[in-house]
Image: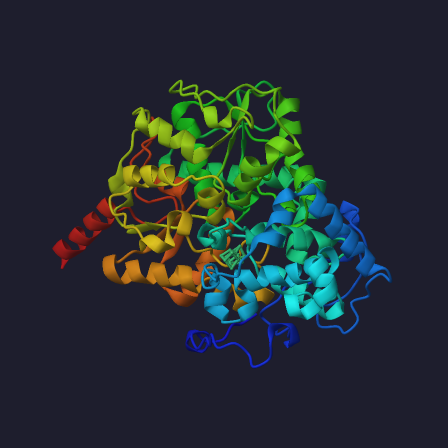
Amino acid sequence: MSAPKPQELLKVSHRPPRTGWMDTPVEFRKGTWCYPAKPKSLEVLDLPFPRQWSPEDEDWKLPPNWKEIVLEGLRERLHKFRSLQIFMDVCVRCGACADKCHFFIGSGDPKNMPVLRAELLRSVYRREFTTAGKLLGRMVGARDLDERVLKEWFYYFFQCTECRRCSVFCPFGIDTAEITIIARELLNLLGLNIDWIATPVANCYRTGNHLGLLPHAFKDMVDFCVDEIRNVTGVEVEPTFNRKGAEILFVAPSGDVFADPGIYTFMGYLMLFHAIGLDYTLSTYASEGGNFGLFTSHEVMKRLNAKIYAEAKRLRVKWIIGGECGHMWRVLHQYMDTMNGPADFLEEPVSPITGTKFENARSTKMVHICEFTADLIRHGKLNLDPSRNDHLVVTFHDSCNPSRAMGLLEEPRYIIRNVCRHFYEMPENTIREYTFCCGSGAGLGPDENLEMRLRGGLPRANAVKYVREKYGVNTLACICAIDRAALPALMDYWVPGVSVAGVHELVGNALVLPGEGERTTDLRGNPLPAVAARVEAAAREEV
Ligand code: SF4
Ligand code: SF4
């Protein structure tokens, strides 16, 4: 799918339409919505109403009692999630969140303002569940649920990346991402999901990872990374698979195993574990840290998360390290403990190298690789040569979930400062808990949605452009596999010349492995700065 030229996308009008929001129908314009879930993916998961349909069709082939199903689903969830009831009741329409959503900034569509996005659901809630709404209808912002409303839900709740930026600015802490999660759950009751979510979820359920790859393919890719590490360093790293009795189970997002540039991050993990002699194993069953169940329903999220713990139990490991992933950590920190925890059959994580107790993981027994590595560096356990990253002028994108959902702000920066010598922050209101989303999270990364992704990614790209022009930044580091998949296209479009890297790719470049030969290239095969300088000097002498 090609996208309009940047000059076109920059002509964003934030002027609202002449008609009121309730009277402005949704328009399914190509490039701004995602293909619907394939029936076979829903069937694998035993989700309701699998069928062929398209958002562009007039008839969405809804079950005859669809309204009843949705309203009953909403009633159940209001009862089950107190936060939802509060979020439905307390918004005072102060507008503090209105201009904080990257999709509103990039599209100018008022229904992408968090307050109005929530109102799409809240208006139905008012009508059905409040006395004022029942009696006064539109006068109090209430409206009936009909097919027009349902189509609007599908369009706009799949234009929210559940990034939670808006919630940081709301004086009441209303979390529109949670509202989106519930709205998507209601849509799923009618078989209305998008394929970029449903198929990875079904794959993960069947084979253990989003891509649906079988154990031998997973192992092949890891072996490929091992070969590449040997080529660059001369060192043979030896990961093991499904090894019972290993101390630690390591789970990465599958995007790091299968896709460029994630594989360089994966190589960094393997090199790190080799350097410290960690007793760990990979699993070909829990071969996915990511959890697209989060974008489907609480139930599906729980099912996918359980797989990691079932595997930890089967392999009799002591605890788990998780790789650089976004939503994997949101699920871990916000949901795992009440869904599948506490994981009492595992031990409280203690670093075998430094003796540090990761008390924050006392219940989940799962430690973020950045916490683990930062601790190693702090205790002087890694031999690092940051000059090997001198060709990289780095800035750091706080991925939404690790930053806002788990507060992982300092560890990645601490690592970057120890493995790179040129690091510059983007403007303050675009980083840490105020970070701007990549625009493709929460399952919104397919090609057919490219225009919307580029619009949603504009605020992030603008901040990168600022540091590129001011400091010559050429590398955008991040700790999320979705970011590594989505940001390269965003950079190529808005800020050409900036490449995207995981933090552990930078670690892998700088890490001096015991017994390594002379390194001439980084993990991507680019000449190291010292080597490039030597070649240049030799060429000058020849001339
Ligand atoms: S900031 Fe909070 S209270 Fe204000 S409009 Fe947004 S959601 Fe409502
Ligand atoms: S959660 Fe993120 S994408 Fe969704 S409305 Fe809030 S700012 Fe926008």
367 relative position to 48: left or right:
left
Percent across and percent down for residue 193 are: 70, 57
Q: Closest to the observer: 157 or 130?
A: 130
Quarter holding the N terminus is bottom right
Question: On screen, 475 above or below 291?
Answer: below
Percent across and percent down for residue 300 are: 70, 43
Q: Closest to the observer: 438 or 100?
A: 100
Percent across and percent down for residue 327 are: 55, 44
Which residue corresponds to the image point at 53% horizontal and 58% vertical from the top-left? 92
Q: Closest to the observer: 392 or 127?
A: 127
Would you say residue 508 is visible in this rendering? no
Which residue occupies the extreme right position in the image?
Answer: 64
Question: On screen, 39 above or below 13?
Answer: above
Which residue corresponds to the image point at 31% horizontal and 24% vertical from the top-left? 379
Quarter holding the C terminus is bottom left
Percent across and percent down for residue 91 are: 55, 56
Question: On screen, 27 above or below 271?
Answer: below
The image quadrant of residue 135 is: bottom right
The image quadrant of residue 388 is: top left
Number of labelled discs? Answer: 0
Which residue occupies the extreme bottom position in the image?
Answer: 18
Would you say residue 391 is visible in this rendering? yes
Which residue corresponds to the image point at 55% horizontal and 20% vertical from the top-left? 318
